[in-house]
Amino acid sequence: TLPTTLTTIEAHAFEACTQLSSIDLKNCRTIGDYVFSSCTALELDIPASVTSLGAACLSDIKSVAVATDNPIYEQTPEGVILTKEKNATLVYVPYNIASSYKIPEHVTTIGSNAFHGNREPASITLPETVTTLEPFAFLCNLNLSLTIPKSVNTICESAFGIRGSGNGQITLAEGNPNYVQTPDGAILTKGEDATLLYVPSTVDTFTIPETVTKIGDYAFNWNENITAITI
């Protein structure tokens, strides 16, 4: 039982507490990053008092339910959590979501670690409303197939933390104003002084394009097949 005066739970406070099955958050307002991450037995109720959910704070927990009167967050029938606003942010997707998942049409931002630890989705459909992919938005299934619509104008470094050397594929739709994809599937910013954002895990040798002046964080994340890089 948490003290009734406690309003904030700091980052990582309960991370990997695998025996924790319940906790009362009735006066809590802020849940920090990774607070309940990997609490695999936890069945969590998020009350109306909670107005801030940190990155990956709910990843790999058994179940979560958001109070219907929460002023900031709402939950879909599939268990997905997003902000209550016209231009919504996708905050959390359950680890056992269906293998093909379509993001709601009013979502404009895929939040940091929204798909953290997801092993199920083999295909995710992004609507044309999405404009922003935050860091580690897709830290998930190594076999994920994903098409990024041309509406996306902000891809943060480390947005694609795809795990492992699977057969998934990230495709950038033609006509994107800010990003370009190379023939071997890498994604980088357009123009001179480009930033390399993503290299597919299926690539075994890779030549950095000549326009690239920066290799973004996690650009080669989990590239277990790569044997040679030419800079």
Image (cartoon, grey):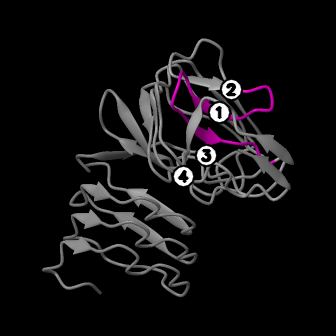
Q: Secondary structure at mark 3?
A: loop
Disc 4 and disc 3 in contact, CB within 8 angstroms: no
Above or below residue 198? Residue 62 is below
Query: Type of residue at label 2?
Result: Gln
Q: Position of residue 150 (x, y in %)?
A: 56, 18
Say which quarter of the image contains residue 223: bottom right
Q: Secondary structure at mark 4?
A: loop
Judge left or right: residue 52 versus residue 7: right
Within 10 Å of disc 3 (Cα), the crowding (few <14, some 14-19, many 20+) is many
- Residue 203 makes an appearance in the image: no
Magenta stretch: give its range: 182-201
Residue at the disc numbered 2? 181
Which corner quadrant holds the C terminus? top right
Q: Secondary structure at mark 1?
A: strand
Q: Which residue: 56% across, 78% down?
A: 41
- Does the segment drawn in magenta span residue 32? no
Above or below residue 142? Residue 211 is above
Which corner quadrant holds the N terminus? bottom left
Disc 1 and disc 2 in contact, CB within 8 angstroms: yes
- Marks 1 and 3, the one that precedes in the sequence: 3
Residue at the disc numbered 3? 160
Query: Type of residue at label 3?
Result: Phe
- Marks 1 and 2, the one that precedes in the sequence: 2
Q: Which residue: 60% across, 29% down?
A: 211
Residue 217 is marked as 4
The label nearer to you, 4 versus 3, is 4
